[in-house]
Image (spheres, rainbow, N blue to C red):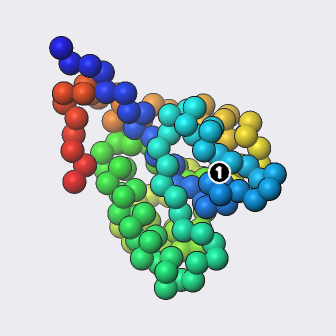
Amino acid sequence: MRTRDRRSFRVALVADRFLNPPARGLDVIPILLEAEWGVIQLPADDYPSEVSRPLLEQVAEQAEEFHRHGYDVIIIGGRAGLDKALADVGLPKFDRLDPATARALQAFLRKRAQPEAASRGRTAGSRTKLS
């Protein structure tokens, strides 16, 4: 018997300041976990461009793979150089939010449409390998 694939087919590219927030800053991890979103961390803002550029290229390649397979990809916060890295691999501009509150992020996530990949009715026995 095949079981339903439990992945949400949703990935957020998240600014470091929301994953490692300063005191009293917004920590998005519990919110994203509750909403069943995957996370790709963006390089910290204080990384020099010679460090962040190759990391952003890797993020863009991963985002392209997820996008090509019908995942919903969003950006929370941002990072200098991210838009260029995404454009360089041919990706469209993803929806973006720089949330001030947990409630704003929760509302943004709730309004997202079902990802194309989720509507394909995948089962655990029929997973598509991301290559």
Left or right: residue 3 compared with residue 116: left
Q: Nearer the viewer, residue 38 or 115?
A: 38
Q: Which residue matches tag 1?
A: 97
* Position of 49 relative to 95 (above/below): below
Q: In the image, what residue occupies the spot 32% across and 54% down?
A: 65
Note whether 97 is above or below 22 in the view shown.
Answer: above
Tell me if mark 1 has few (under 14), some (14-19) or many (20+) residues whose alpha carbon lies within 10 angstroms of its own: some
Q: Is residue 102 visible?
A: yes
Q: Position of residue 9 (x, y in %)?
A: 40, 38
Residue lying farthest right?
24
Identify which residue is drawn at 81% across, 51% down: 24
- Residue 58: x, y in percent? 38, 67
SS class of the residue under badge 1?
Answer: strand
The amino acid type, in three-letter code, at marker 1 is Leu
Q: Is the residue 110 above or below the residue 129 in the image?
A: above
Q: Quadrant of the C terminus?
A: bottom left
When the figure is inspected, residue 29 is found, relative to residue 118, above or below; the finding is: below
Quick check: 117 left or right of 10? left
